[in-house]
Image (tube, coloured by chain):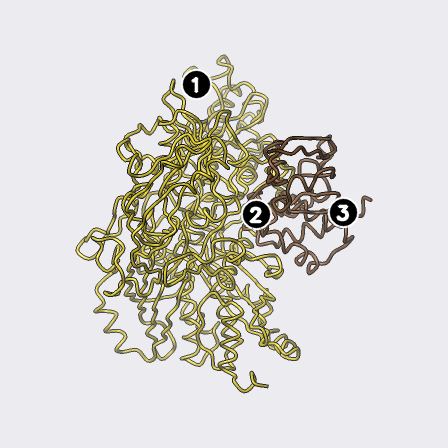
Amino acid sequence: MGKFGIGQPVRRKEDVRLVTGRGCYTDDFNIDGQAQVQFLRSPHAHAEIVSIDTSAAETAPGVVTVFTGKNASDDGFPVLHCLANVKGKDDKPMFSPDRPALCTDRVRLVGDLVAMVIAETIEQAKDAVELIEVEYNDLPSHTDTATAANPDTPQIWPDCENNTVSFWENKEPTEVDEIFTKAFKVAKVNVVNPRVIGSPMEPRAALSTYDPEKDLITLYAPTQGVHRQWGNIHKHLPQLEQDNIRIVSLDVGGGFGLRTKSYPESTLMIWAAKRMGRPLKWLGDRYETMVSDNHGRDHVTKGELALDKDGKIMAARIYVIGSVGAYPFENGPGVPTFSSGRVTGQVYVIPAIHHTVRTVLTNNTPTCSYRGAGRPEAAYIMERLMEEVAVVMGIEPAEARRRNFIPTDMIPYMNNQGFEIDSGDFEGTMDMAMDLADWNGFKARKKETEARGKMRGIGIGYFIEASGGQPEEEARVKIEEDGTATLYVGTFSQGQGHATVFPQIMADKLGIDYDSINVIDGGDTHGEVPFGRGSGGSRSSMMGGTATARSCDEVIVKGKKIAAHNLQTTSDKIEFEDGTFKAVESGGTMTILEVAKIANDKSKLPDDMDPGLNERYRYDRGNVPTSYNHPNGCHIAEIEIDPHTGVIDVVKYTAVDDSGIILNPMIVHGQIHGGVVQGLGQTLLERTSYDPENGQLLTGSFLDYAMPRARHVPDLVAGNNENAPCPVNELGVKGAGEGGCCGAPPAIVNAALNALKPLGVTHVDMPLDSEKIWRIIQNARPVAAAE
Amino acid sequence: MSVSVKMNVNGKTVSGDVEPRTLLVNFIREHQKLTGTHVACDTSQCGACTVHVNGKAAKSCTMLAVQANGADVTTIEGVAKSDGTLHPMQLAFQDNHGLQCGFCTPGMVMMAIDIGNRHANPDADTVRHELDGNICRCTGYHNIVKAVMAGAKAMNASK
C-alpha cells in the first residue's frame, strides 16, 4: 500500500542506528567482572599430543585457570557431533567421529583448539597462552581434495579408510552409461571450486555468564538466529538441560552461513561459564576467525553431457569430491551431497543423470555452508559444460542454452533428484539479461578494447537454486490500543533488512502506518520470540514473510469478528480493505485502529473472545522436496585482460534474477550486488592456500587472503524478471540472498575463456589471479612474450 | 608502566593512563566506551577502525594512543549533530542502501567524509580508488560508491 508497501524501495529502519555508531555487536557488550579467554591453537596440521604442561601458565600473573581436553573431559565437557547424515550404498552410515571441543590426543588441523586460558585481562591471557608447553609428535598431513582418497594419502582418522566420510550415488550408472554410448557428441569439463574463507567483517566473539539462582547459562554470540543453534549446541552439551542455556545475538556483522554453526569455542564458553561461575569474554582475532569459522566450497568435479545431433542433452554424469576438512562438522558432508544435489541438472531438460559425491577428510578447517552452499558448485559445473556444448556443437553459447532450457510449458518440472521446479522463465530471463548487457554491442566493445592492446571476453552464467531452508517459521502480530504494532518473528537479520521489509508486508496487508511498526526477531532464546529458524538458505522472505502475512490474516479474521460485533452484523458480512472493516449490508465501517482501540475492552467483544489483537501463525511449508522455492537468474560478465600483467578487470556485469515477486527492490538488488562480489572474489582473488608439505594456512590474514575491494568491482547492473512468481507461497517470493555468488563464477570464467579463446586456451581453474593468467598467456604466445 | 594521554574526542577533552602499547582504537573503545569504532582485521587492511585525527582519516588500529596525545579525534559517534540530525554522508549511506550488516559502516562513513573533504564532486573511479583501504563483505561496494558520491556532493553543497 502506498509508498511503504510491497514492491517499494523503502529506506531501512535499521540504518540510523548503524550509521551513527550505535550498533551493538557482541564485542561491544561487556559484563562487570568478566574474565578474558584466549585459546591455544595447534601449530601443526596433524600431530599426536604427547604432553601438555600448563604449570607455568597457571601461575602467570592474572591467570584464573587453564583448561585442556585432558583435565576437563570428566565434567560434562562438550563433545561435538556431526549433524549430517549422508548414507552410502546399502545405507552404509557415514564416518561421524566424536570431536572433543579441546583436542585430547591428536590435532588434525592448524588452528585446532588445544587449551583454554582464562585470565583477568586479554594481555595476561595472551601471555599465558605462550607459556603452555605442548609436546607434539608430528604426523604426515595432506590438504589436497582431489587426492585425499588415494590409498597412499595419509589417513587422518585411524578408522576412516581412504579418508572417505561418505560416498553417495543417486542411482546405478547403467542407464546413463547406455545413453552415453549413443551420444552424437560428448561435452566434458573438469573443474575445481576452490576453498574459500567466508570472512564476515565481524570477527567471531562470545560472552558467557552464569546465574546460579536460575541455573541459567547465557551465551552472547553472533548467530543467524539463536533458536536453531540452541538445539544444535545442546546436542554437544547433553548433560545440561536445554532450557538452562540461553543464547542471545545482538547485532551481527555478517553471517553468510558461517554464523549458523555451533562452534567448539561457543560450546566451551557455555561450559566454562558455569564451571567458573563468572562471566567470560572471548574475542577472536582475524586469524582465529579465518581458521575457525567453517570454510566453503572445496569441490573437485568432473562433468560430462551426452548430446544428440541437435545439441540437446541426453544424459549427464556429475562426479564430485568434496573436502569436509579434518572433521565432518554440522551439515558439512550434506553440502556437496544434498544442498548441491537438489539442483544438479540446473535449468536444463536432462532425461537422466548419474551423480556421485565423495566427501573426504583433509587436514584443514571443516567446510560447511557458505553463501550458496553447494548451489554455486552445481551452477558452475553445468554452465562450464554448456559453454563446452557450444564448442563441440559449433553453436553460440546462448543457443546451446536455448536448446536445452526447461521450457515454460514443461513447468512444473520434476528434476532428476525429485525436486519440483515450480516456476521459471529461463529463456525470458536470459533474453532480459542479454538486452540489459547489450550483448549485440559486444563486438564493437571488443574492437575498442583490442585497439588499446587488451583482450576482451563475454560470458554467461545461468543458475538455479533451491531456497527456503528450514521448513517452519513463526510470527505474531500485535496491535496495541494506541495503534502501534509489533511483529515478533523467528527469522534473524545480519543486514538483510527484515525490520524494514516485514513491516512493508504488514502495511500492505493491514493498512497500518509503516512507521508505527516495530520488529522483534529471533535473537534471544528466552525472549519474546519463542520459536524461530533464523536466516539461512535464503529463507527469510518466503518463511518469515509468509508467517508474517498469515499472522496479518489472523488479525483480519479476529478484527472482522470484533467489527461485526460492534456493527451489529456477522463476520462473514464484513469486508476488509485498506485498513477498514466494512459491513456489507449497512455500510457501517470501523478502521483497524478503531478495532485495536476496543480490542482489550471485554464489553465490546463477543462473549467467548479473548481480548487483544495479538495473533500468532506457525507456517509449516512441509519438509518435502516440492516445498522449496527456486530463484534463478542469468548473469553476464564482460572482462578485459591486460596481456602484459595478466590482470582481469571485470568491466561490465549484468544480473537479471528471478526472485519471484520483489518485496523491496533496493534491498533485493543489494543482495544481488553483495552475492555477485563474493562470487567475483572467489573467481578472481580469494585463494585459500596451504603449504602442501606441512598444512600451514598461508593465507591467514587480509594481507594474504585477497578480499575483493571497491576497485575490483564495476558498476553492477541488476534487474529482475517478475514474470514467474513462486506458486508455493502466496507472496510469490523466492530467495534472493545467494544467487549472486552462483551466477558470478561461471559468468566470469566463461568470459575469461572467451577472451583467451584466440590463444587456444580452453580451461582455467579459479581463482583467476594475474600470475596464473599471465603464465597462460605467455605459454600460449611464447613469441609475443619474447618481443 | 603507564603513561597519561590527553586528547579531544568528539569535542570533549578526555584523558587517561594507558600502557604505552595501547592502540588508539583500544583507547577509544575500552577507555572512552565508544564502541562504534570497530576492529575487524588486525593488519590495517580493512578500515573498520577509521576515525579522524586532526581532521584526516586514520586507521585507529595502526596508531598508538600516545601518538594521538593532544590531537582532535572524531569518531562515528561525533559525526551527527547533537540533536540527532545526520551528517549528509550518513544520510547518503541510508538513502543509497550503502550498508547491510553495518559492521564496516562506521569506518566507511569516516573515510567517506574524508573523501568529501577533499573532493567536492568525486566520480566513481575516484571513490573506488579512495576506498581501497576499506573492506565491506556485504554490499559489493556498488551502493557504497553511490553513497559516497552523493554524500560528498551534499556535504559540499551545504557548505
Quadrant for the C terminus of chain A in the image: bottom right
Secondary structure type for disc 3: helix
Task: Confirm or deny contact between disc 3 and disc 1 (CB under 8 A).
Answer: no
- Mark 3 vs mark 1, foreground winner is 3
Tell me which chain the residue with mark 2 is part of: A
**As drawn, is A459 to the left or to the right of B83?**
left
Residue A580 visible in the shown view: yes
Spot occupied by residue A51 in the image (x, y as percentages of width and height): 29, 44
Label 3 neighbour load within 10 Å: few <14, some 14-19, many 20+: some
Tag 1: residue type? Asp
Spot occupied by residue B1 in the image (x, y as percentages of width and height): 59, 33
Tag 3: residue type? Ala
State how far apart marks 2 and 3 are (Cα): 23 Å
Tell me which chain the residue with mark 1 is part of: A
Quadrant for the N terminus of chain A in the image: top right
Chain shaded brown: B
Tell me which chain the residue with mark 3 is part of: B
Spot occupied by residue A703 in the image (x, y as percentages of width and height): 54, 56
Secondary structure type for disc 2: helix
State how far apart marks 3 and 1 are (Cα): 53 Å
- Mark 1 vs mark 2, foreground winner is 2
| B77 or A377, nearer to the observer | B77
- The residue wearing badge 2 is A667
Tag 2: residue type? Ile
- The residue wearing badge 1 is A610
- The residue wearing badge 3 is B154
User: Which mark sits nearer the N-terminus, 1 or 2?
Assistant: 1
